[in-house]
Amino acid sequence: MSDVSFEGVTAKAVANVYFDGKVVSHTILFTGGEKKTLGLIYPGEFRFDTDAPERMDITAGTARVKLAGEAEFKTYGAGTSFHIAAKSYFEIAVDSGIAQYVCSFG
């Protein structure tokens, strides 16, 4: 999923900005109601809580991820993905460069 495009979507122009701009995403909405975010993660370590289940596809760069209940971080590079349960959380860290992702909800 490293070079993906989506057809027939509505893109929200206002960004979702977290952690003083170190994580930034834009929401895209599909005609069938599906929602995704496309984002960038700059160096740092961040924690996110989830309401719905999420799938994170890393499209460029590298991130380390620790899901709720896990003891260690695991590394994910471009072309890999991980799943987060609903009503849970995950920690994500980028050591250098920028990690890019697509997050799918539901």
Image (cartoon, helix red, strand yellow):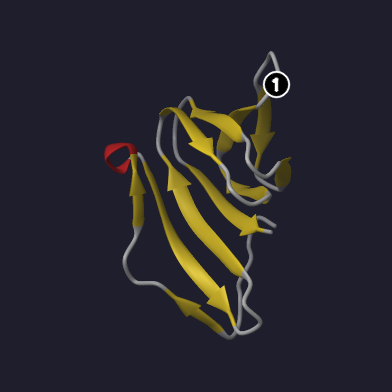
**65 sits to left or right of 27:** right
In the rendered image, residue 27, in percent from the top left (x then y), is placed at 47, 65
Image point (63%, 36%), residue name: 88
In the rendered image, residue 104, in percent from the top left (x then y), is placed at 64, 58
Q: Does 70 appear above or below 58? A: above
Image point (59%, 34%), residue name: 89
Depth check: 33 or 100 in front? 33
Residue at the left extreme of this rendering: 20
Number of residues whose C-alpha sits closer than 10 Å to that of mark 1, classed few (under 14), some (14–19) or many (20 or more): few
Image point (40%, 72%), residue name: 12
- Element at badge 1? loop
What residue sits right under mark 1 in the picture?
A: 69
Query: What is the quadrant of the N terminus in the image?
Result: bottom right
Q: Does 97 appear above or below 79? A: above
Residue at the top extreme of this rendering: 71
Amino acid beneath label 1 = Gly
Query: What is the quadrant of the C terminus in the image?
Result: bottom right
